[in-house]
Image (tube, rainbow, N blue to C red):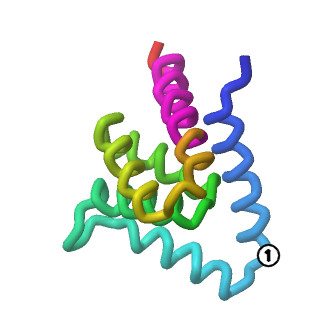
Amino acid sequence: MSDIVKEFNDYRAKMNDKILADKNKIVKRIFNLDTNAFQEGALDKKTKELLGLVASTVLRCDDCVKYHLEASYNEGISKAEISEALGIATLVGGTIVIPHLRRAHEYWDAIEQHHADTEV
């Protein structure tokens, strides 16, 4: 069975390396802003990841949703918290985000399975 979490992370890392190798100053600065925006500050990382997840869902960016789901998992965010945040995203985004909501729930389950498999 394929590990969609590993496949996504491997592809993302490979392509980010390729993109950053171009040494485009604008792209590098955007990547840096993104990294720094999610650091601990007045808001903790957990809150920032949930905000990122909601925004990504409303904007219908499946790759972004996947990224923020895994970052949320790594911050110790529970499935109940994810579900509540995705409920807010669906309320704000409307029914057009329901397909992304489905994929988000599917990916969260894959993250849990991936981590269960790698902890053994």
- Judged left or right of residue 24, residue 108 is left
Q: Position of residue 99 (x, y in %)?
A: 62, 46
Would you identify the image quadrant in which residue 47 lies? Answer: bottom left
| Most frequent secondary structure within the magenta stretch | helix
Rendered view: 97 above or below 5: below
Closer to the camera, 71 or 20? Answer: 71
Q: Is residue 11 left or right of residue 46?
A: right
Q: Which residue is mark 1?
A: 22
Number of callouts in the render? 1
Residue 36 in picture, x, y percent from top left? 42, 73
User: Please, what is the three-letter code of the amino acid marked with disc 1?
Assistant: Asp
Q: Nearer the viewer, residue 9 or 72?
A: 72
Badge 1 marks a residue whose secondary structure is: loop
Along the line of sight, which residue is nearer the eye, 53 or 111?
Answer: 53
Q: Per the image, is 104 magenta?
A: yes
- Mark 1 neighbour class, 10 Å CA radius: few under 14, some 14 to 19, many 20 or more: few
Residue 16: say if magenta. no
Return the residue found at the far top. Answer: 120
In the displayed image of the protein, which residue is found farthest to the front?
A: 95
Q: Quadrant of the N terminus?
A: top right
The residue under the point 63% across, 79% down is 28
Q: Which residue appears farthest toward the left when viewing the image?
A: 42
Q: Residue at x 72, y 61 (%)?
A: 17
Tell me if residue 116 comes above or below residue 31 in the rendering. above
Give the residues drawn in magenta, as a range. 103-118
Residue occupying image coordinates x 48% and y 44%? 70
Apparent side of residue 93 relative to residue 21 in the rendered image (left or right): left
In percent of width and height, residue 89 lies at: 43, 58
Please name the residue shown 64% across and 44% down the image: 9
Position above or below: 103 against 40:
above
- Locate residue 104, reporting x and y percent: 54, 42
